Each structure stands twice: as C-alpha cells, then as structure tokens.
Amino acid sequence: MVIRVLGGSNKKTANIGDVVVCSAKAVTPNSMVKKGQIIKAVIVRTKFGVKRSDGSCVKFDDNAAVVIKEDKTPRGTRVFGVLAREVKDRGYAKIASLAEEIV
C-alpha cells in the first residue's frame, strides 16, 4: 500500500521509475521485510502504462515494485518478471541488471 510518492510537492500518482514510500502488505516467509514495515520501493511495472518518445505505449498485466535501500540499491538479489526501460534510464542500473528481461 503506497503511503507517499516521493519527488514532487503534491504528486498524486506514481509512474514507472518513481520512488514511493509504502507499507508491506504481503511478504514471503523468512524474508528481510516484515509485514506492516515501512519501506521505499521503485515502481517497475504498471497497468496504466507509459508513453515513450517514439510514440509507443508500454503496458503490463500487473503493478510491481522493487524494494530499495537508502542508497537506491535493491534489498533483494532477484527481480522477477520484465522491467520497463525507463527504470534503467532513471538511474537504477543495478535493478535493471537483475531483471530477466527489459522491454
């Protein structure tokens, strides 16, 4: 559950590559993140999609985020699913290198 979108005075929605402060709702057993913990995450996939400068529009089947540390590196060692190219363009090359595929 998103608490706040960072990077703007009164930003209401988050797009791909934005950092959000959120609460962990569903976690796997024995994970570093506990249920209800306040974390920072980078949005990597959205159902709404994003328009690119070449005129194409990229949409995904689900909304997804990657949990990050304070220095913008991922807390985990694996990223499941595909990532949008905008994540790498926003300066998250480490997250992009962990992805299965970049669209």
Image (cartoon, rainbow, N blue to C red):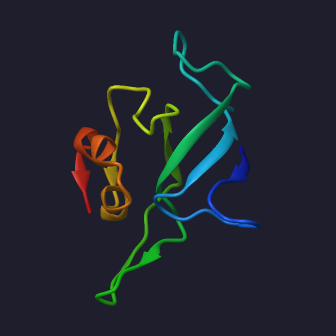
Residue nearer the viewer, 35 or 92: 92
Q: Residue furthest bottom?
A: 55
Residue at image position (23%, 51%) is: 101
Residue 40 located left or right of residue 82: right
How many numbered circles does the render carry?
0
Q: Is 8 located above or below residue 62 in the figure?
A: below
Residue 31 located left or right of residue 88: right
Residue 97 horizontal/vertical position (percent): 23, 42
**Quarter holding residue 89:** bottom left
Residue 67 horizontal/vertical position (percent): 50, 35
Q: Is 85 located above or below residue 1 in the figure?
A: below
Residue at image position (53%, 54%) is: 63
Q: Is 78 located above or below residue 42 in the figure?
A: above
Residue 69 horizontal/vertical position (percent): 50, 31
Residue 36 located left or right of residue 65: right
Q: Residue furthest top?
A: 30
Residue at image position (32%, 30%) is: 78
Quarter of the image where the N terminus is located: top right
Residue at image position (33%, 26%) is: 77
Residue nearer the viewer, 19 or 77: 19
Quarter of the image where the C terminus is located: bottom left
Residue 64 horizontal/vertical position (percent): 50, 49
